[in-house]
Amino acid sequence: MKFWEKVTCASMLVVFCATNIFASNDEMCDRLRLLIDVMDLINTNYVSETNPKDLVVGAIKGVVATLDPFSQYMEEKAYRNMKNETRGSYNGIGLRIMIRNDFLTIVSPLPDSPAYRAGVLPEDRIFKIDGKCTAGMSSSEAINLMRGKAGKKVKITILRDNLPGELEFNLVREKIKIETVKAIMLDDDIVYIRLKEFNAQSAGDIKKVLTNYQKQGIKALILDLRNNPGGLLDSAINIISMFIKDRKLALTTRGKIAEIKKEYFTTGDGEFSDLPIVILINKGSASASEILSGVMQDFKRALIIGSNTFGKGNIQTVLPLPGRTALKLTVAKYYLPSGRSINGFDNNNAKNGITPDIEIKIGMEDEIKLYMQGEIISASNKDYKSIVDMEKKVEDKVLNKALEIIRENKVIEKIKLSTALTDLKK
C-alpha cells in the first residue's frame, strides 16, 4: 500500500473510532485496523498486482455476505438493473434468485420467460453461468451475467435434487415483461385467478375480474399463488382487504430502527367478504405470496392447499451509495396477525414459510410437467373442459382438490377443521 493510501486509511480509522459509530466498540476499531493491515500485506506481498478499489469492494461484499441471503452490495450495473426491473421490464431470462445454504438458488422463474419455458424450477441451484462457476458469486453478480442484450444466448448449468449430474439450459435473452393476473371461469360458477406477481396493478386487476364475474353469479374463488415470487407489499394488503369486512391488523414489521416498525391494516372495504376462497401455494410461492396466504390463513378467511412455501419473510431497503452503487439491506421482518414469522432462514429452520391447511405432495417428474402446463390453465381463451381433455396432461392434484372441496360446499368446514387441528398441536 502506498504511503498516501496508508495515511488516508489511518485518518479514516481515527475519524470512525472518534465518532459515535464505533466509539463504544473498541473491538470494532481493532478489527478495522486488522482489515487495513491485511490490505497492506496483500498489496506488498501478493504475487500479482492488486487494485485497492477491488480489495475494498471485495471487503464490502464479504461484510454483507455475513448477514443473510437477501442483503447485498450492488455495484453500478447491478443497481441499474434493479431499477430497470422495478419499472416493469428488462432483458434477461426471467429468474428470481437468492443465495441459500451457500448455493445460488432459484426462487421462481417468471411465467412465460425463457427460463420458465425451458423447465427451470424453483429451488434449482445454478452451478455455472456460461461455464463460469457460481461458487462464492453474489446474486447481483449472477444477475449481471444472465442479463444482456435481447436475442443473445446464455447457458446456465443447474443442479437439481434427486437428479444425478448436471442439467444444461441454453437460453436466449428476451425482454421480460412482468404480467400479473390471468383468470378463467371453472364449472360456470368457480373463478380461477392465477396471480403471477404483485405489482401496482394487481389488486385493481383482481377486483375488476371478480366484479365482472360476480354479475354471472360465482360460487367461490381459487387464487393460485404457485410459483409467485412476490412483489409489492401494498398490493398484497389491498388484495387481502377485498376479502376482510372489518379493519384489522394484517401485518407488522419489526426491526432495529424505530421508523421501520410499522403496522399494516386492512382497509375495511371487504367487497367480497362472503366469497369462499381457496389459495394454492408451493415452494415457489415467496414474499408477498406468503404474506397474503398467511394473513388469510390467520384470519380463517381462506383454505390453503398445496406444499410449503419458500420462506422469505424479510424486508429489504435499498440505500444509495457514492459511485452509483447501493446497499440492499435487510432492515426488518414480517409478522402475521398470529405473531408468527414467515421467515424460514432463522436458526437453520428447515420448515420454511407457510404450511398449507391441506398438504399435497407432488413428485418431481409431475411437478416439472405441471410447471410447464401452468400457462395453459390460465389462458383466457381456454375453458376448463378443453384443458381436462388435453392429451398427456398431468393431473393437477392441488387444483382438483380445491375444486372437489368447493363443489361439496366444504370450504368453511375444512378451514374450521384445520384450525382445530392447529390448536391441538399448540
Image (tube, grey):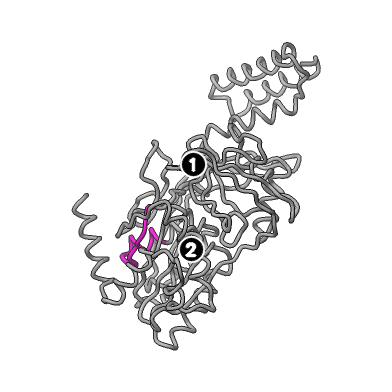
Three-letter amino acid code of the residue under disc 2: Ala
Residue lying farthest to the left in this orientation: 424
Q: Is residue 302 magenta?
A: yes
Residue lying farthest to the top in this orientation: 45
Helix, strand or loop for disc 1? loop
Percent coordinates x, y for residue 194 in the rendering: 48, 68
Q: Nearer the viewer, mark 1 or mark 2?
A: 2
Q: Is residue 123 above or below residue 263?
A: above
Q: Is residue 91 magenta?
A: no
Identified at 25% across, 67% down, the residue is 414
Percent coordinates x, y for residue 75 in the rendering: 70, 40
Q: Which residues are magenta?
A: 293-308
Of callouts 1 and 2, the N-terminal one: 2
In the rendered structure, the answer to whether residue 355 lies left or right of residue 103 reads left
Pointers 1 and 2 in contact (C-beta within 8 Å): no
Image mark count? 2
Percent coordinates x, y for residue 241 in the rendering: 44, 70
Q: Is residue 54 above or below residue 394?
A: above
Helix, strand or loop for disc 2? helix
Q: CA distance from mark 1 to mark 2?
A: 24 Å
- On-image quarter of the N terminus: top right
In the rendered structure, the answer to whether residue 106 lies left or right of residue 299 reads right
Q: Disc 2 marks which residue?
A: 236
Residue 216's disc is: none
Q: Disc 1 marks which residue?
A: 256
In the rendered structure, the answer to whether residue 299 lies left or right of residue 192 reads left
Three-letter amino acid code of the residue under disc 1: Lys
Q: Is residue 87 above or below residue 120?
A: below
